């Protein structure tokens, strides 16, 4: 939840523009607020420790503080993030994207600033890492163990794990699924992904069966309006939270004997994508659409996870046995 009283007026104006005009999602607005608020705190107070950085108010900050900024000041902030807060390159890259959007608004849309200090701000170079994922046998074992678990939420938890491993869905997408989003006759599910972009996910029999099994025991006496529509409910009969889903996945991974420091909810998304690419001969463009990636470059990481297809391509060359 954003406390707008902690923000300078020009930050709230940027958030309003991003939400109303650009139609950014609530999660994106929340990230913008966090990133820009912390950046402004640094600019205003130049903290020397994490404690100073967090325990300060800048609600009365004026635009004059931004008029003095140069590119070097932005580099100084990024250095602070890396050296003092130990922020990884991916985190710093996200903050750079937020800062760019913020100053683009101030200079090009609101005309509050004349000079954009972030115009030549570069994105930190990201390290290319292979995604961690469960093997086919580990995935089957996880599903089996979850299905066999004896508790009152067994069918719900099994449906959650099944959807993650079969559809490559994001955590935020899963918790926001409404029953009306599912077309049971056509085996389709509509989800709202990053940037409020809607996409269709095609469900297989395993997913549909798991969802139907859960719906047969899902509570019906629900008080809150939002929860009435929600597919997955918590013990309190409310829409299930991200934290609860993370706990469920962590618990089931532990029971399967998998390292919870290595695997997480997001790793199940990696697993689904990897298994589809490795065993399903899925076209990379189809995989991109399924995962909701804006750039094909993001999806291409899965083509490097397993070299068996590359080896098979070479061995299939008609000159291979000469």
Image (cartoon, helix red, strand yellow):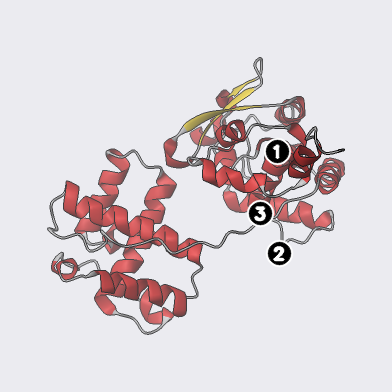
Of the pair 54 and 298, the residue shown nearer to us: 298
- Measured from the top left, where is residue 175 in percent x and y? 58, 41
Residue 176: image tag: none
- C-alpha gap between disc 1 and disc 2: 25 Å
User: How packed is label 1: few (under 14 Cα within 10 Å), some, or many (20 or more)?
Assistant: many
- C-alpha gap between disc 2 and disc 3: 14 Å
Q: Is residue 138 left or right of residue 220?
A: right
Q: Is residue 128 left or right of residue 213?
A: left
The reply to whether residue 316 is visible in this rendering is yes
Which tag, 1 or 3, sits closer to the chain's start?
A: 3
Assign the C terminus to one quadrant of the image: top right
Q: Quadrant of residue 260?
A: bottom right
User: How packed is label 3: few (under 14 Cα within 10 Å), some, or many (20 or more)?
Assistant: some
Residue 261: image tag: 2
The residue that disc 3 covers is 131
Which element carries disc 3, helix, strand or loop?
loop
The residue that disc 1 covers is 277
Q: Is residue 216 left or right of residue 15?
A: right
Q: Height in image: 97 above or below 155?
A: below
Q: What residue lies at 18% left-to-right and 49% top-to-bottom?
A: 108
């Amino acid at each position: 939840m954003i406390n707008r009283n902690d923000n300078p007026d020009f930050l709230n104006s940027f958030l309003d523009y991003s939400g109303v005009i650009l139609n950014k999602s609530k999660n994106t607005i929340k990230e913008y607020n966090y990133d820009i608020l912390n950046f402004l705190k640094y600019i205003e107070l130049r903290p020397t420790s994490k404690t100073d950085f967090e325990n300060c108010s800048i609600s009365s900050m004026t635009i004059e503080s931004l008029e003095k900024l140069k590119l070097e000041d932005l580099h100084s902030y990024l250095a602070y993030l890396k050296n003092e807060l130990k922020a990884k390159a991916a985190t710093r890259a996200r903050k750079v994207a937020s800062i760019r959007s913020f100053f683009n608004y101030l200079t090009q849309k609101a005309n509050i600033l004349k000079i954009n200090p972030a115009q030549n701000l570069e994105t930190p170079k990201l390290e290319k890492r292979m995604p961690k994922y469960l093997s086919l046998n580990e995935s089957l074992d996880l599903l089996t163990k979850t299905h066999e678990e004896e508790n009152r939420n067994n069918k719900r938890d099994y449906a959650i794990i099944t959807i993650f491993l079969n559809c490559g869905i994001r955590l935020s997408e899963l918790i926001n699924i409404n029953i009306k989003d599912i077309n049971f006759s056509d085996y389709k599910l509509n989800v709202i992904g990053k940037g409020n972009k809607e996409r269709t996910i095609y469900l297989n029999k395993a997913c549909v069966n798991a969802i139907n099994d859960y719906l047969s025991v899902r509570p019906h006496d629900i008080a809150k309006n939002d929860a009435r529509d929600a597919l997955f409910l918590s013990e309190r009969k409310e829409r299930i939270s991200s934290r609860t889903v993370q706990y469920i996945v962590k618990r089931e991974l532990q029971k399967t004997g998998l390292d919870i420091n290595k695997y997480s909810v997001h790793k199940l998304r990696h697993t689904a994508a990897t298994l589809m690419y490795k065993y399903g001969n899925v076209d990379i463009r189809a995989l991109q659409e399924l995962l909701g990636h804006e750039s094909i470059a993001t999806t291409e990481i899965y083509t490097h996870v397993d070299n068996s297809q590359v080896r098979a391509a070479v061995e299939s060359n008609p000159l291979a046995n000469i």
